[in-house]
Amino acid sequence: MAVNKAKVAIGFIVAGVLTVFFGTALTFVGPIIIDDQIVKNTVIDPKNEMSYTMWKDVPVPFYMSVYFFHVLNPKEILNGEKPMVEQKGPYVYRKRIQKDNITFHPNNTVSYREYRRYYFEPSMSAGNESDVVTIPNMLVLGAAVMMENLPFAVRLMISATFKTFKEGPFLTKTVGELMWGYDSGLVDFLNKYLPGMLPSSGKFGLFAEFNNSNTGLFTIFTGQDDIRNVHKVDSWNGLTQLNYWRTPQCNMINGTAGQMWPPFMTKESTLPFYSPDACRSMELVYQRPGKLKGIPLYRFVAPKTLFANGTDYAPNEGFCPCRQSGLLNVSSCRHNSPVFISHPHFFNADPVLLDYVQGLNPTEDEHGLFIDIHPQTGVPLNVSIRLQLNLYMKRVSGITETGKISEVVMPMIWFEESGYIDGPILNTFHTNLVILPAVMEFMQYGFITLGLATIIIAALVYHRAKSKCDDGDDDATSYGSTSIQEKDPLLEEDMD
């Protein structure tokens, strides 16, 4: 019986060793299997139903929140006093994104146009589109700066034109008109006699050219041949580099189209992307790790060098002529209008910009931009892109509408484009990227623990069985010798 126990114990020891080996192998093979699945699912391919649909239609709800800097003292500004502004908003719009004209090419790229539409969301807004706001008139104050080097007589004629069409230095309009366009005799006149001078041939509005429009023809890599290239831009509108800026580096089209990035990111990774609206490539850097409903993420933010001027950060020299750090001069891609992009409330900008305008209060939580990425897949889980539109304005002699305005970079609006994964997509993400890896990890360590426990218990059973077996052999030997000794006297008696 003890021999049988020993044999069974040996069998369990072998099984335990195999279980430990399987668990150990799983620790190496498991991550490879998961990574292989990630590669298969992040390639842009119609066969990848979930990830392809996610890329094509972007089912995550995106919102654009717009804040206006309502001018409180327009008359005083014309007399040279410091502008005072009051933030109004947010006015929230749901953004619908859809890719169209999708064409796959033999060189592992795909081209498409992405269309966008905006729908006002009253329940999420601090007011209605009928709210009235006063902001600088870009048509007048922007044109004045553009025309300041023209002959004095021409400037007088431009000023007379403004008066003819009753265009003043400040606009008081509804939010809806400022956003999507308003009727203007001056705009109609310019479009008729100076076509191409204005960005839009219809009504003039800050976002008129954004609604019901596309962001241009993007051609990006599918990642079919190299997953490290997935989503990276090959060309935009047929261009592999831009012609807005003064250096080849600033004209480069880097990174992705700004919606997804290649998988397997580390803390040393960056998030480069090309923004047609900003007319340039931008790059975010790692800030910290975090979690969204149990899913691990890395937060990437804008470095202080993003909008630094050429003096503070030499590689940005190509974006000049520059003003203070924290401002990006986009006049070269905005019909030479003196428009600057910055972070809201001049966050991360030269403090002197805050001194020129009263009513600003920058904080990182409210005005810093960030993208939270799931590092394994390169999919954004939470996005908040915040930018501010500013107008450079000053007194221009001959154009009386500019009065005695002091030279100032005037904030007009800032907007936040935000979205985060939720609902069924988040559940799928959680299942595939949190629960399944956790189950696999539990299984691999479970197998190792079970195997080791089996080996230890079976070894003890084997040792005890072996000990019993050895004790039994000793008893048999002693029993035999005692019997012979006990029989010896009897044998002697018989012999007598």
Image (cartoon, helix red, strand yellow):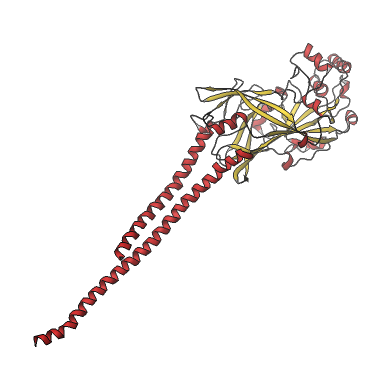
Nearest the eye: 183 or 162 = 183
In this view, the residue farthest toward the front is 494
Q: Quadrant of residue 113?
A: top right
Left or right position of 230 against 181: left
- Asked whether residue 190 appears in the rendered view, the answer is yes
Query: Which residue is found at the position 51% from the left and 33% from the top?
Result: 227
Nearest the eye: 182 or 314 = 182
In this view, the residue farthest toward the top is 193
Quarter of the image that includes the C terminus = bottom left
Query: Which residue is found at the position 64% from the left and 27% from the top?
Result: 98
Compared to residue 22, the image places residue 286 above or below, namely: above
Q: Give the image location of residue 103, x and y in percent.
A: 56, 22
Q: Quadrant of residue 281?
A: top right
- Asked whether residue 322 appears in the rendered view, the answer is no
Nearest the eye: 399 or 28 = 28
Q: Quadrant of residue 387?
A: top right
Quarter of the image that includes the N terminus = bottom left
Query: Which residue is found at the position 76% from the left and 40% from the top?
Result: 362
Query: Which residue is found at the position 80% from the left and 27% from the top?
Result: 176
Left or right position of 421 against 339: left
